[in-house]
Image: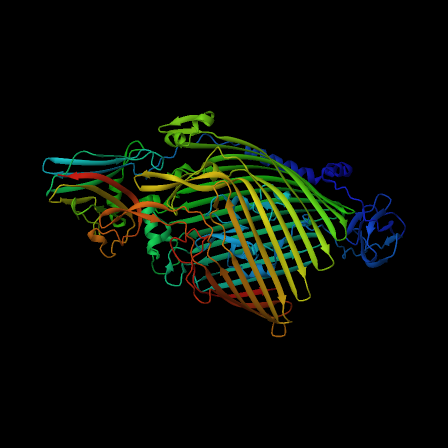
Amino acid sequence: MKNSKILALALLSVFTFSSCNNDDPIAVNEEEVITTVTTTLISGNQTVTMTSRDLDGDGPNTPVVTVSGDLLVNTTYSGAVSFLNESVTPVDNITDEIKAEGVEHQLFFQAPAAIGTFTYADADSNNKPIGLAFTLKTGTAAATGNIVVILRHEPLKSADGVSSGSITNAGGATDAQITYPVQVK
Amino acid sequence: MQTKIYIFFCFCLFCTIGFSQNTVSGKITTQQGLPLSGSHVHIGTKTVSSDVSGNYLIKRLPKGNVKVYVSFIGFQAIDTLVNLAGDQVLNFALKENAAQLQEVIIRQKANTLNKSLLEQKIKTETIEKFSNQTLGDILKEIAGVSSMKTGSSVVKPVINGLFGSRIPVINNNVRLEDQQWGTEHAPNFDVNAAGKITVIKGASGLQYGGDAVGGLIVIEPISVKRDTLFGKTILNLASNGRGGSISSSLHKGNDKGWSWNALGTFKYSGDREAPDYVLSNSGNREANFSGDIKFTGKKYDVSGYYSFYNTTIGILSASHIGNVNDLYNAIKNKVPWAVYDFTYDINNPKQKVQHHLAKLNYNYYFDQTASLAVQYSFQFNKRLEFDVRRGNFNNLAALDLALTTHAINIDYKKTVHDWSLKSGFNGSFQNNFANPATEIRPLIPNFDRIEFGTYGIVNYDISDSFSVDAGLRYDFSQVQATKFYFKSRWDERGYNSEFADFIVGEQGNQWLAKPSFTFHNISASTGFHKEFGQDLHWYTNVSLATRNPNPSEFFSDGLHHSTGVIELGDIALDKEQAVKLSTTLQKKWTAFSVEFNPFINSIRNFMFLRPVGFEKNNRGSFPVWEYQQTNARLAGVDVQTHWKINNQWQHDFALAYVNGRDLTNNEFLIDIPPLNLSNKIQFAKTEWNDLKLELKSEMIMRQNQFPDNNFITNIIVNNELTEVLVDISTPPPAYQLLHFYSEMKFKTFGKSNTTIAFSVQNILNTNYRDYLNRQRFFADEMGRNFQIQLKFNY
């Protein structure tokens, strides 16, 4: 009977397809994850390195934030931010990608005025700041507070105040947001 | 064999003492006196077939005029009225049908076995109105059905407050497998391919599965039983989105021999517009094809069906956010941060979805009261989701899933006297492959799933006005997944004590685990339908549904980009069980009818997302929501009225209310549709080219019953970190929308005609946001939309 033929055919196809079991999967290389954000501040022979490292990405572990030393009052530091993906080997340097796509990225630096003020020291192809290089002029009196470094993807760089470092109208999506506790003395 | 099946159903035998009334018996023969065995005899509401000697017997028939219908293939059917005054003998001699053209094969109606639950149906003419929209949009025509949306093109149906995996969608007798577990995933279905849509607001459709905790949507294609060839083309133009759609179909019907249907649909739309701004990147494209071919023989038919659904949907640019500060800003600013000029282009984020469905059917009719259906179906779903990524990654999908499903269904139907029986078996194999080439940890892991199910449903007419039904189903399900867990996550979830056996390997800081689950489930349904006179019906149904955790409930593990929330699944979840009691009173007067449908759905181990804390990473701080189980109760009422004011004027009213409680935590449930009311007034005049004018008002109240999931985060104000409350819980205000629809029909030439329709949605260009739209934090809903529809029948 035709009936049984169709049934047999159908069963056959089910078992043929189901027998091709997948091999064990490969762990995904998360190429874009920013595991490590390092902000370096240099003035003369003093270097302050501030790092936030989170090797499990979206996993439950909290990033480990370290700040190598205190900042000096009334000092101009030249700063740089680097972004690494240390979850892959070899380690992926994301800083270069951000620089290459400078038009689509901008860093924002936030700190209370007593800590200091930030100025951009680099520019993308449209002559708008990126923020991978900057200067920090620390305050004139001793202070404690946080420096917050934010990387925005596809911000509205032409919006009001954005190119001078105000994040209010920047829009875009946050790719990194690090809070470094610092002391100026 | 039939006896065996009969015995098989004895589990649900109802002890009834017949309302002994009239008995009719007799013999069916040819005009030469030869017995016709297996001929179909239908008297009143009862159906039997004649035995080997052509004899039949029907008991408990009411007094008075009853309809008698006797048929046998190859013979002219007898269709007459008989006045019954007592027991009677009726012999029929059927006349051979020389031309063999007038044969009518009576088939049992496909899905009406559950007479205790009033099914809600949407007809072709309503479906055609929505030719340019989605399945979710159409279903809102039914009281108690609302929609869960992501933007304007991803629309999921919500029945009595439940959606997603709790509402299986059955297309052409195939259960649609389409990653329905994700809230951003709408059913992969071209509405133009539907001939009729039925909504079952309960789990009583046991032939389709036992896990319909929320209800079922059953879609049947257009099928033509008479010998004819016709075509239909629907053209839509819409002002909002500056696009439209065209759908063309050809149908070749036949009562015998070959018949076929073919349908193609193409949709194209640019950015939608809210009253005050462009909803940037909300365009979509869709190209679909479906076709079937069928051969009908004397006692059987064979058919093959194939459909292909292919769509690209833009996801609102402004809904792509990186962390909760971005979400806070979006909620506070009320205007999307990304508003660009109108464009047809679709950029990231976007979805590309393809769905193939192929099936083979074989139906065998033992006689006119018994049939066997065998079906094999194959489905392949490909889902690509593109996100805003750096550099070349932008061209690489962030999520790449391929879901393959094979299924076999065997169904047997039989009508004997006052009994209708249906029973069957199904088996399926499913494989999900999450492509690691995305270079993003997949939301859903690889898995294999094997399922078997068997069911029996019986309906018994105790009297002409009282029928009962009962059904029982058993399902076996086995899932084996392969997934990498961060060791830190594995520990945080506390899996080590119970699930250490699942670990099969290790790579760096990740465990490779192979979680495997087996479920044995029972589901059931029973109820009655009582008719008081001609105009008052009472339906009551109780159903038990059992649903296993879906892949996202088991395995979610990461950041959800549009909500800025880390969602975590739990492999310790158990199945969820729902008992739904639903009753409907339907009363009809001459010009007015009303349907009143209260329900209560008690769900044990209801799975839902619950906020549990925060996690920090280099992007910022994120609220963590995990899947938990609770005891939930949904109770509510759906009301529909229809008032035929006079020959021209009609009024329709619908109201739906549902209250959802989390009983364990003594909270309201999230995402429960608010009270909504709709009023429609229609003017129709046949003399004026079938003119129809409709004005519809939709009132959606504010949902005041919601859980408080708000949280505190730190944002930078004047260069200082400041605590702010992120209000993700408060539902948007109530809103009212007005819509207009008008149409006229014109005879063109011969038998062909053309319908022209003009409609306006959101006439007042109202600004509003909907509680059940995932993008309500980011932008208003669509504004006014003018639409012109041309429909050609030929």
User: Residue A43 placed where, x, y %?
Assistant: 11, 39
User: Residue B166 placed where, x, y %?
Assistant: 54, 44
Residue B748: quadrant of the picture: bottom right
Residue B507: quadrant of the picture: top left
Q: Is residue A66 left or right of residue B517?
A: left
Residue placed most toward the observer, B69 or B713: B713
Name the residue located 43 percent from the left edge and 26 percent from the top edge: B496
Residue placed most toward the observer, B715 or B142: B715
The C terminus of chain B sits in image quarter: bottom right
Is residue B534 in view? yes
Q: Is residue B338 left or right of residue B687?
A: left
User: Residue B103 placed where, x, y %?
Assistant: 76, 55
User: Please, which residue is most extreme toward the bottom here?
Assistant: B688
The N terminus of chain B sits in image quarter: top right
Vertical order, B394 against B746 (above or below): above
Q: Is residue B304 left or right of residue B12?
A: left
User: Residue B622 placed where, x, y %?
Assistant: 35, 42
Vertical order, B629 against B258 (above or below): above
Q: Is residue B486 left or right of residue B305?
A: left
Is residue A127 in view? no
